[in-house]
Amino acid sequence: MQVYDNLALQEVQSISVDDSPDRLKEIIRMILQELNQMGYDDVCKILEDESQTKLDTTQISELKESFLNGDYENILQQLDYSDIINRKLQFEIQKQLYLEIVQQRNYEQAVNLLRQLSEYNEQESQVLAKLIFLQEDASQLYAQLGIPIDQKEQRLQLYQKSLNLLNFGDFSLQTQFDKVIDQALEYQIKRCPYHNDSNENKNYSLLIDHNCQSYQIPKNNSILFQGFDDEVWIGKFSNSGIWIGCATRKNSIYIISKDYQYKINKAHGMDINSLVFSSDDKLLFSGSNDKKINVYDVQTAQLKVTINQHTNEVLCLAYFKNHLFSGGVDGWIGIWQDNGKLVNQIKSKVVKNILLTDQYLLLHNAAIFSITVIENDFKFNKIITHMEEQELIVSSAVSQNQQFLVLNVSKEKPKLHLWSLKTFQKQHVFFGFQVKGIELKCCFGSKKDNYVCVGSQDGKVYFFNKNNQLQQNIINGHNQAINFVDWHSQTAQLLTASDDKTVKIWTQDQVVQQQIINIINEQEQPSNTQLSEIVEEQNDHEEEEYQQQSEGDQSF
């Protein structure tokens, strides 16, 4: 005990609070209170004598004495509290009176008091009523109510409950030390740029500032794909992570895996605006300013279908539950089967992007500064709300858990806006990256959507903490602007596509040696034996059986 006493004194003596005697006194009283609750009475006595600071004020000492003596009328006269606290405290005091009256076997008075208790808490009063009729040991009922059997302990418990209900000015409540620690930890977590909720980050300390490791950021370049025929405008993982689909400024499409590389020269006559894989990764769809949607076999790069029913530029594609969604300048959204058959049409304005969740269809309207939220019931005729912005929306992305939306909102003053898809309120704003007249894609990252990332004009990738909008990290990704970023949650990899004619794969793990893959550009578009253009509604046809993917992990 003597060793502990000396350590406690040294700790207090080491506290330096210049010109703040009240604050020092407050710290000492919090330490006294914590030591007292731990049962170190001797330490408390020494610390009180040395610091000339008492744990309890005179008012609190008198109040505590009234509780221990059961002088409840005097207690009510001493305290000043609101009506809400009055009712709570009155219930607790009446409950204690009831317990003591039952122990004295004054059942008539106990029944009258029980009626008053039932007006405030009927459920607990029903349990209390059993004490009157219980002839045997009532320990189980006391345990159910969370009340000690000993009367002195009951009164002390009532005293502690009262302290938690009332405000005594400079007096520290019983749980104040724990509250201060919780608040300090919460503050540190909010200021931690890398913080996430995984179990490995549950150990905190007030001795040093909390800071999660930055390893969760995919900042290690594992694979470099080089030799594309021009600037890479689009780069996307397939759903399984086995394939990558890319589109370049020369309107070429590349379908890449670890084992295969396909190039489709001049896949479209004009700029390619969107690529999307089917859910099973068997098909790749491309939408273009040439008004067409092409459908490619992923494993052979063979053109299977061309959809040309749009009358103007096709700006965006999305794939959801075995259906392709397309939108653009001509004022309608098409919903298609994989074979190109149109199954539904939705009236719209000029649509720049289509995002789908289990609950909503989100339309990025190019002509107005808003996201239209529509109920996803496959009728798509009920507008839920509009998420209004004050500036041009450049790009948009939905989190993996479908709870958040991030918007790249301006070409002139670049920033990202984070919106909640539960409240439809703006949560955070992220600054720092560079844009000069180009459209940069953004995305969420990590298994729990802990960060938002976006490419930049300066060839860097910027990461922001979703929860506190702090900038987490910057990686020097490319020599020129990064047009597209895409995160794959299963493989924990990030893809970046750039004007420097390269695509890079980034991982969280340390990379011993970067793998460099030179893209083959001599290969022409594969011969097409099943090409068909859709002008009017087609007859259904059976899908060709596809060879099963080879077993094992084929991700990059």
Image (tube, grey):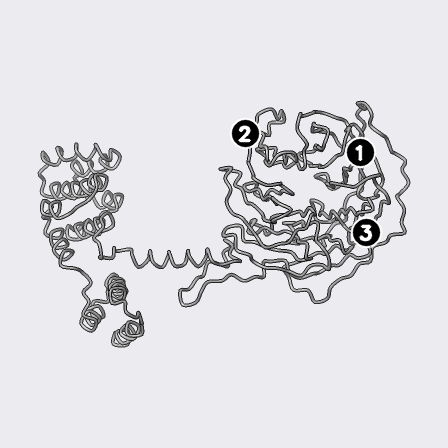
In percent of the image, x 64 and y 46: which residue is there? 411
Give the CA separation, mark 1 to mark 2. 31 Å
Circle 1 is placed at which residue position? 292
Q: Is 373 situated left or right of 318 in this image?
A: left
Image position, residue 117 (x, y; %): 19, 35
Q: Earlier in the sequence, mark 3 or mark 2?
A: 3
- Three-letter residue code for mark 2: Ile
In the rendered image, the quadrant that contains the C terminus is bottom right
Occupied quadrant, residue 40: bottom left
Q: Secondary structure at mark 2?
A: strand
Would you place residue 66 above or below residue 41 in this image?
above
Q: Secondary structure at mark 3?
A: loop
Q: Nearer the viewer, residue 357 or 131?
A: 357
Occupied quadrant, residue 225: bottom right
Of marks 3 and 2, the one in the foreground: 3
- Three-letter residue code for mark 1: Lys
The local crowd at label 3, few if under 14, some if 14 to 19, many if 20 or more residues have their Cα within 10 Å, is: some
Q: Is 141 situated left or right of 452 in this image?
A: left
Would you place residue 497 above or below residue 421 in this image?
below
Image position, residue 391 (x, y; %): 59, 41
Circle 3 is placed at which residue position? 230
Give the CA separation, mark 1 to mark 3. 22 Å
Circle 2 is placed at which residue position? 384
In percent of the image, x 23 and y 45: which residue is there? 142
Q: Is 8 situated left or right of 397 in this image?
A: left
